[in-house]
Amino acid sequence: MSAKAVSYQPGRCARAQSKGVTDSQSGTAENKRLTRAVNGELSAVSRIAGRASLEAAEGRVPRCRRMPSLPTAFRSQNSQPCDSAEHTKVPSALSALSNSLLLSSSATLRLRGEKCLRRLPPLAGAPIRIENIPRLRDRHGAVHGGSFLRERRIAFNCTRAEFPRILVHELFHFVWLRAGNPLRQSWGALLEAELAAHACGELGWSAEWRKDALDAVDTSGRTRRWREYCCESFCDTAAWLYSGVRRHPEFTLAARFQARRRVWFDSAVENRELPL
């Protein structure tokens, strides 16, 4: 694939078609025309996602495609509504569409994902497709989830109990990509301080095994292994904070370091809308 999968593997690393929108209140020709336009856009999204999945199954490398632009930006339900006058007369079908951050051929999976979004800080961005793919694997072996950042797609191969934690982890890979260097450097400085204090453990196995593989050269030289650890630690910490899972065998970081990470997220993440 042209888009590298960022995966969450179990054990070793325990570590995407919305329904066509119909406007129930459309009594005028204008409302019907707008509803047909919205359904046409969603069909285009569905065709693109379907081709990408077929190519992936056949082992072909899909081209990077641009999602069709929809009439309004997709935002999570926690985002502030647009104050622009041109959006105040949008019919009910389009209003519902504007809150759909996740797309899926499975209504059950989409509803499960939207329930998880309610715990997150405000999010904004184009929709992300989520899907179940049995026997999902990456170069390390079997995985419970994987993010395809360029395709804006997340694949799952996990139990229902693990789904919230893995969804939040994978969503924050999109956040990390667009977070900007100042935020990433600030997070890295927090991790450096933890290492200097000999902090053991992590908030997910995906981060912990990378942490255990680090040496002094990785930290001082900002090597790829260091950058990958920073990313996975960021995503695991977000999953610990926002998934609703309070206890898990992979939450092994000491409480005093957990508290410092919570304070960092409160000041650096929760005071702004997060781009996806």
Image (spheres, helix red, strand yellow):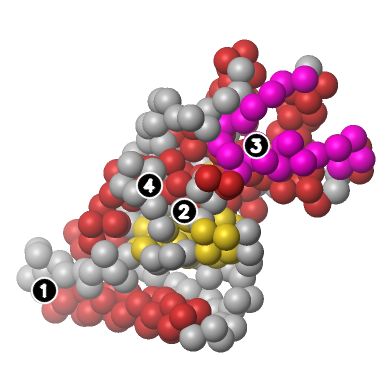
Q: Which amino acid type corresponds to the residue marked 4 in the rendered image?
A: Phe
Where does residue 122 sit, x and y in percent of width and height?
45, 41
Which residue bears the numbered disc 4? 163
The answer to whether residue 200 is magenta is yes
Pointer 2: residues within 10 angstroms few (<14), some, or many (20+)? many
Earlier sequence position, callout 2 versus callout 4: 2
* Secondary structure beneath label 3: helix
In the image, residue 142 sits, relative to residue 180, either above or below, namely below
Gap in Å between the C-alphas at discs 2 and 4?
9 Å
Snapshot quadrant of residue 74? bottom left
Amino acid bearing label 1: Thr
- Magenta span covers which residues? 198-218
136 on left or right of 257: left
The quarter of the image holding the N terminus is bottom right
Closer to the chain start, of discs 1 and 2, is: 1
> How far apart, in angstroms, are the residues tagged by discs 4 and 1?
42 Å
Mark 4 neighbour density, 10 Å: few (under 14) some (14–19) many (20 or more): many
Instruction: Examine the structure image and report whether residue 28 is included in the region drawn in magenta.
Output: no
Circle nearer the viewer, 4 or 1:
4
Please give the residue where the numbered disc 3 appears in the rendered image: 208
Proximity of marks 3 and 1: CB atoms separated by less than 8 Å: no
Quadrant of residue 186 within the rendered picture: top right
Q: Are marks 1 and 2 in contact (CB under 8 Å)?
A: no
Q: Is residue 1 above or below residue 150?
A: below
Whether residue 139 sits left or right of residue 147 in the image: it is: right
Compared with residue 22, is residue 183 higher up or lower down, i.e. above or below?
Answer: above
Question: Which of labels 4 and 3 is toward the front?
Answer: 3
The answer to which of 131 and 274 lies nearer the viewer is: 131
Q: Which residue is mark 2?
A: 144
Q: Residue at x 53, y 28 (%)?
A: 251
Q: Which residue is mark 1?
A: 28
